[in-house]
Image (cartoon, helix red, strand yellow):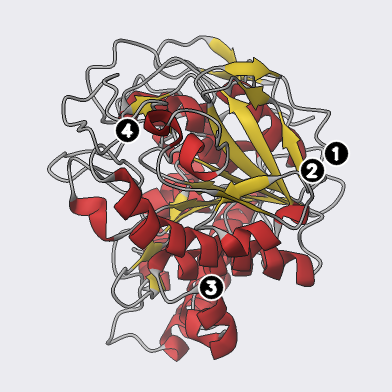
Amino acid sequence: MATRNSPRSEVSRRSLVTAAGAPLLGLSTNPWGLLQRAVAAPRQTKNKQTRSCVLFFLFGGPSQIDLWDMKPTAPVEIRGDFRPVATSVAGIHVCEHLPQVAQQMDKICLLRSMTHNMNVHGPACSEVISGREYFGAPTTDQATEQDWPSTSAMVMRYGQSRGGLPASIVLPWYLQFPGQARRIAGQTGARMGERYNAMLVQGDDKTSQFQIDGLRLRETLPRTRIQRRSQLLDELLDQAGPGGWSGKSIGGWRRHRDRAQTLIERRAGRLLDIEREPTPIRERYGKTIVGQSLLMARRLVEADVPLVTVNWMDETKIDGVNTCWDTHQENFPKLKNLLCPIFDQSFSAFVEDLHQRGLLETTLVVAIGEFGRTPHMGQFSQSSNTKKTGRDHWPSAFTALLAGGGVRGGQVYGATNHHAAFVADKPVSPADLVATILDHLGIDPTQHYVDELQGLNHALSPGQALRDLG
């Protein structure tokens, strides 16, 4: 069981790290916020082996009834244009436009009974990502200090950081609607504390390259000079006598410095250099930012990062009406021509790659959006932008795809009614899913933290970890 450490007890020591350690490292920008969030001292967990989770967030809300919970006997205005196809597991069918995913179904669990009550993007993202009901009225999509902490923030605080890397990484972007000043709700440390925000590894959707802001080396500062500065810092710390800083402060300083330098070395050399991957592997994932982000996620899993969040990104991210998996209009052409081909190639490659490398057993993969889509075509539930050719938001019943991490593949968990409108068996809340992720990572979801907004104690998750997926 994890133990709670008071973050405020380390402020003074961390301030010293910033004041003297950062200039000696020669970082291009002030890395205080990054160091405070990304290389904070590891907390104890109950991990007995290296476990990871990849949360693949399908921003916008994919249509459950058109993709993985199809109802072929329903009227055409409900079942839509697509046909189901057989998978590698007898009796399980998915959309005809997901043929490669269909062949990996023996490793995948279709959890068809996700449900909550929020039909607005931002608050719904918050509910799924944090595992908590939204704190107020759904009047904004943007993050506020009142938000519940994201799963990535919980793991950042209580997860086991290894090898100098942070416990929680997000890529290739933090979700944000065009024209809005702040990221989508639910992606921050919020009331737990912004210093627990996961580290962002930014991806370029044009070049599929990745980088960490704040850890770029200055062009005028060669690596040898960085190394000499590090040696000088060691000498200064060694000369600090009894009248100087405490041994604990010096040890903390060294630990933060070493982790920052590890990040620099890995960033400049191996870890984030996606081009080190063989060309056939990169092509198998697909040369899209989604595919390359999942490939980067696999590299981070190999580097023992506990939680990697991959946020869906495609060319429609700048569309304020039909952003990513949002399909208020032209639902079927967008799924067939853009979304399904990217997902089918990248997700199937990711699951297959983890399996072949022996990583799937200890890596829990969760692919989910913030909600599903309306059972009836053109049905109004939230957005007046919905046309007869589209589907509106629908949180009452939707699907999550799970693989690995002890989850038995080739199964359907839960069920919906004849129109995929409501859960008929084994309902699963976002709280349950978050508790399952935390439990897999060896983090007790019942442990408490102090709410910095109100000074109250809260459990990490009020949900129950799913014990019958194996």
Q: Position of residue 65 (x, y in %)?
A: 49, 35
Which three-letter amino acid code belongs to the residue tagged 1? Gly
- Residues at circles 2 and 1 in contact by the CB criterion of under 8 Å: yes
The quadrant of the image that shows the N terminus is top right
Q: Nearer the viewer, mark 3 or mark 4?
A: 4
How far apart marks 3 and 2 lie (CA) works out to 23 Å
**Residue 384, image quadrant:** top left
**Residue 208, image quadrant:** bottom left
**Is any part of residue 423 visible from this angle?**
yes
Asked if 150 appears above or below 299 in the picture, the reply is: above
Which three-letter amino acid code belongs to the residue tagged 3? Tyr
Residue identifier under label 3: 285
Q: Nearer the viewer, residue 307 or 387?
A: 387
Q: Secondary structure at mark 4?
A: loop
Sequence order check, earlier mark of 4 and 2:
4
Q: Nearer the viewer, residue 108 or 330?
A: 330
Residue identifier under label 1: 470
Residue identifier under label 4: 391
Q: Secondary structure at mark 1?
A: loop
- For label 2, count other residues whose C-alpha is less than 10 Å away and answer few (under 14), some (14-19) or many (20+): many
How far apart marks 4 and 2 lie (CA) works out to 31 Å
